[in-house]
Image (cartoon, helix red, strand yellow):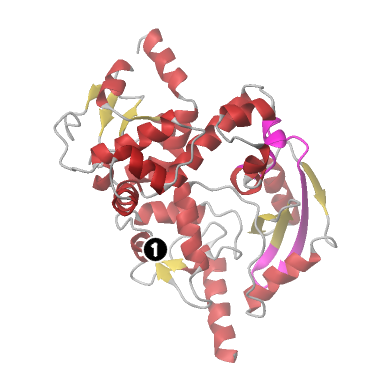
Amino acid sequence: MATTQALTMNNMLDKEQEFWQANYWDAVAAHDSRMDGVFLYAVRTTGVYCKPSCPSRRPLAKNAVFFRTREAARRAGFRACKRCKPDSPGSNPNVDLVEKVCRYIDAHPDGPATLEVLSRAIGLSPFHLHRTFKALTGITPRAYADSRRLQALKAGLRDGHSVTRSLYDAGYGSSSRLYEGAASKLGMTPARYGKQGSGVAIHYAIAKTPIGRMLLAATSQGVCSVQFGESDGTLESELRREYPRAEVTRSDKGLAKWVRAIQGRIRGEDRKALPLDIQATAFQRLVWEQLRDIPYGDTRSYSEIAKKIGRPKAARAVARACASNPVAVAIPCHRVVRENGDPGGYRWGMGRKQNLLALEKAALTRS
């Protein structure tokens, strides 16, 4: 691949690419035909661009580059896939609507992305605009605007700009508007993010549970990690590897309340929700919210969760979202199984998943 072409692609891996990677890679992995016409993806290793539904073997996520139009893909040096024929006329009449909404939001980063404003700009009713946009993209126009704004903020901070300049350049309008949601979106304050998390205080505790040793870690905002393992040393090493620049300190007494809450939840004695400080893509948020709605002692299949979030073909993507859950038990990914009743995979071991499900059923029998 020519040097100029490589440079072009490198320049594209900015806030635009981060947004697409975070929100639409799952559509590519699931061969989601509903997204055809909304975006295209290209593969660096083959030089080809495709529709999301292309039946070809999926590339590694790190090799995917996203585009709004085929013209943009061509300018970057990619050619059309001969299998899915992305240059053929689209069959979805609502694709143009979604593109217009995205272009309007991109052109007005500091403006409100309310349905009323967007419907006046596009010339459609708020209800029809909202329903169509979410059906095609899986997220709302407001979520799209929030993600674009957040990625612009991150890009500014990484480039070394001040928090004040970055937030106004990103279109936040005021610092209060940014900070009110910073913890849930960045996992830390904007200033800390600008320093790549350096100095963030994370306290952790390790305790015994019915399914083995557990490490619980938390920031001042809430629980950020719940892991299970065989040895304290391994659990500590994994935590430090996950947060290499944070100030990590053991605090068994300070976190005793939250440790007891997880232990109680495993035994069926405490089912209250814990405050969380975790990061997630739009798709992961959709999945994890559904997991928290699964009743104690019950299970759902990966395909059932996919249908619940309006992505019936995304069962594999749901499984990946479950596997990436950083707070075991607090978000009960162990309650998702295969359609045939087989437990399926579990990040902390199949034995633990089966034991968790058995303990929950036993607790319901006792109650």
Q: Quadrant of residue 308?
A: bottom left
Front-lying residue, 193 or 215:
193
| In this rendering, position of residue 94 left or right of residue 162 | left
Front-lying residue, 158 or 357:
158
In the rendered image, the vertical position of residue 210 relative to residue 143, given as above or below: below
Q: Residue at x 34, y 42 (%)?
A: 120
- Check disc 1: other Cα within 10 Å, few if <14, some if 14-19, many if 20+: many
Is residue 235 magenta-colored?
no
Q: Is residue 58 visible?
A: no
Per the image, label 1 sits on a secondary structure element best described as helix
Residue 1 image point, x, y percent: 35, 13
The region drawn magenta spans 186-213
In the rendered image, the vertical position of residue 236 relative to residue 98, given as above or below: below
Q: Is residue 123 visible?
A: yes
Rendered-image quadrant of the C terminus: bottom right
Residue 304 image point, x, y percent: 36, 66
